[in-house]
Amino acid sequence: MAYSEYWNPKNETLPREELQALQLLKLRRFCDWAYATTPFHQRKFDAAGFKPEQIKTLDDLRRIPFMTREEWMESLMEKPLFGDLLATDSRNAIRYHLTSGTTGRTPIRVLDSMKDWDWINEMWCYGIWGFGVRPEDVVYFAFGYGSFIGFWGAHYACEKLGALVIPGGAQTTEARIKQIIELGVTTVFSTPTYALHLWQKSREMGIDLARESKVNKVILSGEPAGSIPAVKHQLEEAWGARCGDTAGMTEIGTIMIFECSHQPGGTHIIEDHFIEEVLNPNSDEPVGYGELGERIVTSFGRGFIPLIRYRTKDMVMKVPASTCTCGRTWDIYSGGIRGRWDDMKLIRGTNVYPRAVEAIIREYPAIDEFQIYIWRKEELQDEITIKLEIKTGHEAEWPDIEHKLTKDLASAHEGLRFNIERMDYGVLPHFELKAKRLVDARPVANY
Ligand SMILES: [Zn+2]
C-alpha cells in the first residue's frame, strides 16, 4: 500500500513564512493560557514586566523570561508535590511521571491530562512515521514501563498509526531476544546502549540478529548516542537495520526532534508544535545556522505544565531544512543533541547530576572522600561507579553503607544501578578546595 511520506503532509511541508505565522499565533495563545492559569508563570511574567499581549512578532519571544530547571526544583521544594506550575487542578490529571532532579532526592514530578497524552502521542507519530513505521509493522518496546516517561508515548503512537505493539516490559534480555525473533518483530524501540546490549547478548546466545530477525528499523531515544555516526554505524551493522534517532524530555513529555527516513545526519524539529531557539549560553544572544549553542524550547502542547523558553542546557547546531532531501520545511539539528552545557550526565537514559549524587553521599558521615567514575563496560554499556573511602574508625559500618547507599542512589535515579567500590584510605585524591570529583572515562563522541 502506498502511504504519504509524512504523518501531517500539510504542516510538515508548510512554507516557512506560514509556519512562522502559525508559531506566532500559538505562542500568543499559549502565553495567555500560562499567565491566566499558572502561578509560576504569573510570578515570572510580572517580575519581568512581560504581558502576553506584547507578542506581536516572533522576535517578541525574547521579551519572555527564561524558565530554568533550578526554578522548577525550587518551586517543587517550596510547595510539594508539584510546586506552583500546574495550570489546572491535579484532579484533572490521568497520569504521573517523574525524572531525577538536579539536587538531592527530590525528583521533577509531572502530571498530564488526557488531552496532553493525545498530544504526546501525536508528536511521536510525526517522528516514527517519518522514519518509516507503518501499520504493517510489528513493533517491540525494550522498555521498563515504569515511572520514567521514556517510550510510553511511542507505545501509544504505534497503536494510533495501526502497528502491532509488543510491550517487552519486565523481562530478561534473553526473553526479549527470543520474542523479537519468534514474533517477527520489524521495529525495535530502545536506548542506544540497550540496543547494543541486546545485540551482544544475542551473540552469546549464538543468534545473529541481522540474519535471524526481521528487524529493519531500530528507533533510538534517551541518549545522544543515536546521532553519533560511529555508534549508529555499529548498531546498523549489528542489527542489519536502519537506526533512527529521536530526542525528548520528561519536562516536555514527548519528543521534539526526530530523524526522518532520508537520514540527513540530524534530526528535524517539530516546528508546528515547538519553537526551538539556539542561543549562545553566555550572552543569551541567538546564534546562526551552523553554530553551536544552547537549545531553548517552547512547547505548545502540554497544557498541564506550560513550558515557555525552557533552558535545556543541551548543546545543538541548527542547519536549514533544505539540508535534507525529504521535503520537510522543518529545520534540523545536525548531529542531534551533541552534549551538555552543564555537568549533567546521561547514564543508560537516566539524568545524573553530580551535585545530586554528592548530596546523597554527604548524608553518610562515615564516608570521607569519594569520586564519581563514569565508564564504558566492554565498549558497550555505560556504568557509574562511586569510589569511596571510609573514615578511620568507621570501617565496621562499610557493609551497611554499601547496601543502603546503593538503594538511596537508585531510588533517586529512576532505579539506575550504581556500583559502589570501597577504596583503601588515601587512594583517592583528597581535595582541599571544591574539586572535580567527577571522572568521565567514556570515549568522546565524534561527529
Ligand atoms: Zn528529512
Image (cartoon, rainbow, N blue to C red):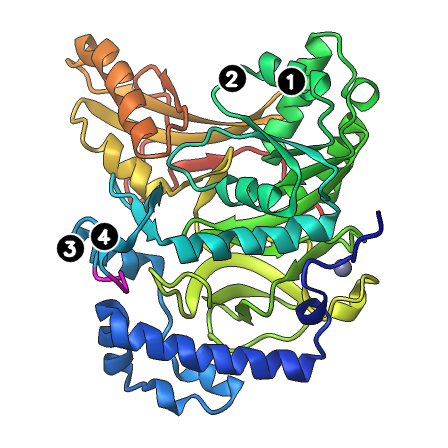
Residue under label 3, please give it: 79
Amino acid type of disc 2? Answer: Gln
**Residue 97, placed above or below residue 287:** above
Ligand 1 rendered quadrant: bottom right
* Helix, strand or loop under label 4: helix
**Residue 247, placed above or below residue 357:** below
Residue 226 location, x and y as percent? Answer: 66, 42
Overall secondary structure of the magenta stretch? loop
**Does residue 402 appear anywhere in the picture?**
yes
Amino acid type of disc 3? Answer: Lys
**Residue 117, placed above or below residue 215:** below
* Helix, strand or loop under label 3: loop
Q: Which callout, 1 or 2, points at the residue further toward the start of the chain?
A: 2
* Circles 1, 2 touching at the beta carbon (< 8 Å): yes
* Circles 4, 1 touching at the beta carbon (< 8 Å): no
Q: Residues within 10 Å of mark 1 (few under 14, many from 20)?
A: some
Q: Which callout, 3 or 1, points at the residue further toward the start of the chain?
A: 3
Residue under label 1, please give it: 179
Q: Which callout, 3 or 2, points at the residue further toward the start of the chain?
A: 3
Amino acid type of disc 4? Answer: Arg
Alpha carbon of mark 1 to alpha carbon of mark 2: how far? 10 Å
Residue 140 location, x and y as percent? Answer: 63, 30
Residue 32 location, x and y as percent? Answer: 35, 79
Over which residues does the magenta segment extend? 84-88
> At 61% from the left edge and 63% from the top edge, which residue is drawn?
270
Residue under label 4, please give it: 91
- Nearer to us in this view, 100 or 433: 100
